[in-house]
Amino acid sequence: MNTPTLASSGPALHEQNQRQERLLEIIHDGLPPFPHTVLELTSVLSGPSPDVKKAANLIRTDAALSAQLLRMCSSPVFGLRSRVVSINQAATLLGADRLRTLVLTGAMVDLVGSGLPPEQSTRFWQHSFLAALLSEHLSKRTGYSESEQAYIAGLLHDIGQVPQWMLVREGKSQKKTILPENWFDNPSMECDFFGLDHCHLGSKMATSWNFMPSFIDVLAHHHDWEQAEHDPYLARIVGAVEHFLLTRVPDEPADSEVTELSGELPAKIMNSEEPAARSSQPYDDSEWQDLKVDLETEYNRLLPVVQGGLMSVITGPN
C-alpha cells in the first residue's frame, strides 16, 4: 500500500484533495453496508465447530440470497458436478468452507454491481475470480494450509477499485475528469491522482466490515506483501498471482469510458513493460520460473471456465 501523496502544484493539490475527500465519502456513505445476514453466516460457518444446518436455515430466510446461492452453484466457475435444487443440498455438497465462500462472493457481487457499470463489473469479476482460483491453486502448490482463505483473499483483493470507478463515473458525467494514462491497478499513479490507492481504500472498507485481519492485510499489501503483519504468506500468494495476472494483456473491454477519459486503449493498461512498476513477484527467480509455468497452465485451463460461467454469477435471473 502506497502512502498517500500530495500533488506539487496548487491547483493540482486542490483537485487531488477533492478527489481524496470524495473517495472517503463514497466509502462512508456511498456503498451499502455489508449485509447482516452474511456477517451472521460467516460467524456460524467459522471456528472449530461450523454449523452447516443452522447456516442453511439462515439462508432460507433470505429469498434473494437463496436464489443467488443456487444460481452460483449451477455455474461452472465453482465446479459442482451435481445439480443443486435446494439450500440443504447446497450446504451438504459445499461444506462449511465453500458455503462461506459462496455467501461472501454473493455479497461482494451485489456490492460491486451497485457501484460499477455492467461492462466494468464484468472485467472486474473476471480478474477477481481468476485471482481467487489461482490463489487457491498456488496455496496448495506451495503448501499453505488455508486454501479457502487464499480463494477469498484473491476474490477480494481489488475491492478498493470500486470507489475509484464510482468517482471516475462521477467525473465523466461532469465532464471534468482527465485521467492519467495507465493509472488502473497502478498504486503509485492512483496515489498521485486520487490521493489514495485501491489498496488503502480496500483495507478501510474491509476494516469497516469487520473482516479478518489477514484479509485486511492482503487488501492493503498485495502489491507489497512484505509489509503484511498478520499473514505475510497469504499476502505473498495473492501478490504473486496479482503480479502474474498483470502480465496478461486483457481483451479490450466493451466499456469505452477508459478510452474516452484517458485517450488510451484499455489493452495498453497492462502492457508487458509495466508489471514490475506495479508489483513485484515475491519469490526468488528460480522458484518463480517454476511457479509461473504452473500458473500459466492453470490460467489457460481456468480462463474459458471463468468466461463461460461469469454471467451466471454476476447477473440475476432473466
Image: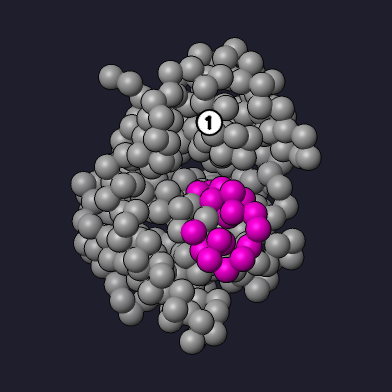
Q: Quadrant of the C terminus?
A: top left
Q: Dot 1: few (<14), some (14–19), or many (≥20) neighbours within 10 Å?
A: some
Magenta stretch mostly in which secondary structure? helix
Residue type for callout 1: Leu
- What is the secondary structure assignment of the residue under circle 1? helix
The structure residue drawn at horizontal position 46% and vertical position 74%, both measured from the top left corner, is 291
The structure residue drawn at horizontal position 43% and vertical position 18%, both measured from the top left corner, is 85
Image height check: is 186 above or below 23?
A: below
Q: Is residue 202 visible?
A: no
Can you give x and y, in whole percent of width and height, for residue 259 in the image?
23, 56
Asked if the stretch drawn in magenta spans residue 44, the answer is no
Give 95 or 174, whichever is nearer the viewer.
Answer: 95
Can you give x and y, in whole percent of width and height, for residue 120 in the image?
33, 45
Can you give x and y, in whole percent of width and height, for residue 170 in the image?
39, 42
The structure residue drawn at horizontal position 41% and vertical position 74%, both measured from the top left corner, is 292
Query: Is residue 26 rendered to the left or right of residue 227?
Result: left
Q: Which residue is mark 1?
A: 93
Q: Which region shows up in magenta?
A: 137-156
Q: Is residue 248 visible?
A: yes
Q: Quadrant of the N terminus?
A: bottom right
